[in-house]
Amino acid sequence: MILGVCEWLHGKLGWKTQNIRIAFIIAVLLAGFGIGLYLILWVVKMFSK
């Protein structure tokens, strides 16, 4: 866990945290947009409190 995005998504979506992390890793390896998506979700998480 770097910025807490996966735990935050777990609470919002109800998905397993492990599955969310795997999805981010696959997105980074296959498409390369996983890092940008992760950072965007981190910003959303920070301002949604």
Image (cartoon, grey):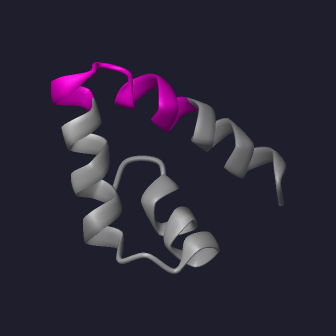
Horizontal relation, residue 15 to residue 40: left or right: left
- Quick check: 41 above or below 10? above
Quarter of the rendering occupied by the N terminus: bottom left
> Percent from the top left, x then y, of residue 6?
44, 60
- Quick check: 42 above or below 21? above
- Residue at position x 60%, y 41% in the image: 41
Q: Quadrant of residue 20?
A: bottom left
- Residue at position x 16%, y 27% in the image: 29
Horizontal relation, residue 3 to residue 35: left or right: right
Magenta-highlighted residues: 28-39
Return the residue found at the far front: 31
Q: Is 38 within the magenta?
A: yes
Quarter of the rendering occupied by the C terminus: bottom right
Q: Is 40 within the magenta?
A: no
> Percent from the top left, x then y, of residue 35?
38, 27
> Percent from the top left, x then y, of residue 12?
63, 71
> Percent from the top left, x then y, of residue 9?
54, 64
Predominant SS along the magenta part: helix
- Residue at position x 58%, y 77% in the image: 11
